[in-house]
C-alpha cells in the first residue's frame, strides 16, 4: 500500500512538472508578443507555436507541445526590440548566430525567445530566406504567420522536427495532398515525399 502511494505521489509530481513546463513556455510566448504588440513592432509567431495554432483550428487534440518560442521580425527593428524586452527583464544573447532573449541570466538558450529575421536565411544551407513579416495569418492573442509561409519555412528547414510539424498539419487536415503544387522544387518534392511516405 505504501509503495503504491509513493508511486502515485511520484507520478503526480511528474505530471505537475510537465504542466508547469508547458505553462512557462506559453507564458513566455504571451509575454513577448504582448510587449512587441504594445510597442507596435511588427512580428509574427513562427515555428512550432505557429504550427500548434494552425493545427488547433482543426483539431485541438492533435496540438503538440513545443519548447521553442520563435518570432519573425524585421532586422532593422532589433535595437527597438532589445530596448523593449530588456526593459521588461529579458536578457539579450547572440548565440550560435542566433539572436535570443532569455528570461534571466541562468536560463538555457533553448528556453529563450529566438528571433528570426525576414529576408535572411536562418542557416547558410537553406534554399530560401525567411519570409516577410506578415500578421495576416491567424491569432487574437498574438499574430501568427500565414499558413503558406509557415509551410514553406518548414520545407526549407527540413529537419526531423519540421517534418513532424508538416505531418501534424497534414494529419489535422490543415493542408492536403494538393499542396505540393504551390511550391517549386526542392520544396515540392519534399512535401510530396511526406504525403507519399507519412511513416
Image (spheres, rainbow, N blue to C red):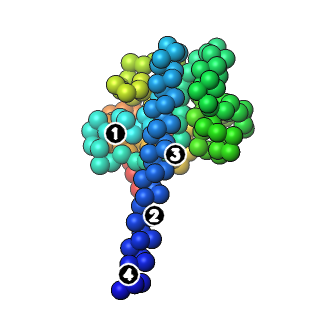
The residue positioned 44% from the left and 45% from the top of the image is 23
Circle 4: element type = helix
Residue that carries the numbered disc 3 in the rendered image: 67
Distance from disc 2 to disc 1, alpha carbons, whole Å, reads 26 Å
Label located before the other in sequence (4 or 1): 4
Circle 1: element type = helix
Residue that carries the numbered disc 2 in the rendered image: 14
The residue positioned 54% from the left and 25% from the top of the image is 72
Regarding residue 54, the answer to whether it shows in the image is yes
The front one of 193 and 109 is: 109
The residue positioned 38% from the left and 78% from the top of the image is 5
Q: Please identify the quarter of the rendering in which residue 90 is found.
A: top right
Residue that carries the numbered disc 1 in the rendered image: 55
Circle 3: element type = loop
Q: Residue 84 placed where, x, y %?
A: 59, 20
Indicate which disc residue 11 carries: none
Label located before the other in sequence (3 or 1): 1
Marks 2 and 4 close (CB-CB < 8 Å): no
Label located before the other in sequence (2 or 1): 2
Residue that carries the numbered disc 4 in the rendered image: 4
The front one of 131 and 48 is: 48
Q: Residue 30 placed where, x, y %?
A: 45, 32
* Camera-side mark, 4 or 3: 4
Marks 2 and 3 close (CB-CB < 8 Å): no
Regarding residue 120, the answer to whether it shows in the image is no
Distance from disc 3 to disc 1, alpha carbons, whole Å, reads 17 Å
* Camera-side mark, 2 or 3: 2
Distance from disc 2 to disc 3, alpha carbons, whole Å, reads 17 Å
The residue positioned 68% from the left and 30% from the top of the image is 92
Amino acid at each position: 500500500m505504501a509503495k503504491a502511494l509513493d508511486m502515485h505521489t511520484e507520478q503526480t509530481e511528474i505530471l505537475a512538472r510537465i504542466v508547469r513546463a508547458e505553462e512557462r513556455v506559453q507564458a513566455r510566448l504571451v509575454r513577448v508578443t504582448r510587449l512587441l504588440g504594445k510597442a507596435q513592432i511588427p512580428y509574427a509567431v513562427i515555428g512550432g507555436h505557429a504550427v500548434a495554432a494552425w493545427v488547433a483550428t482543426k483539431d485541438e487534440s492533435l496540438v503538440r507541445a513545443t519548447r521553442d518560442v520563435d518570432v519573425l521580425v524585421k532586422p532593422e527593428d532589433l535595437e527597438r526590440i532589445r530596448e523593449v524586452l530588456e526593459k521588461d527583464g529579458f536578457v539579450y544573447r547572440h548565440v550560435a548566430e542566433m539572436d535570443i532573449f532569455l528570461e534571466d541570466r541562468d536560463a538555457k538558450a533553448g528556453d529563450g525567445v529566438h528571433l528570426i529575421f525576414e529576408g535572411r536565411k536562418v542557416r547558410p544551407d537553406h534554399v530560401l530566406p525567411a519570409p516577410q513579416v506578415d500578421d495576416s495569418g491567424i491569432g487574437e492573442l498574438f499574430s501568427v504567420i500565414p499558413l503558406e509561409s509557415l509551410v514553406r519555412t518548414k520545407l526549407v528547414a527540413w529537419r526531423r522536427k519540421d517534418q513532424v510539424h508538416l505531418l501534424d498539419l497534414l494529419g489535422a487536415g490543415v493542408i492536403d495532398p494538393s499542396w505540393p503544387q504551390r511550391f517549386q522544387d526542392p520544396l515540392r518534392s519534399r512535401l510530396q515525399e511526406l504525403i507519399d511516405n507519412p511513416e
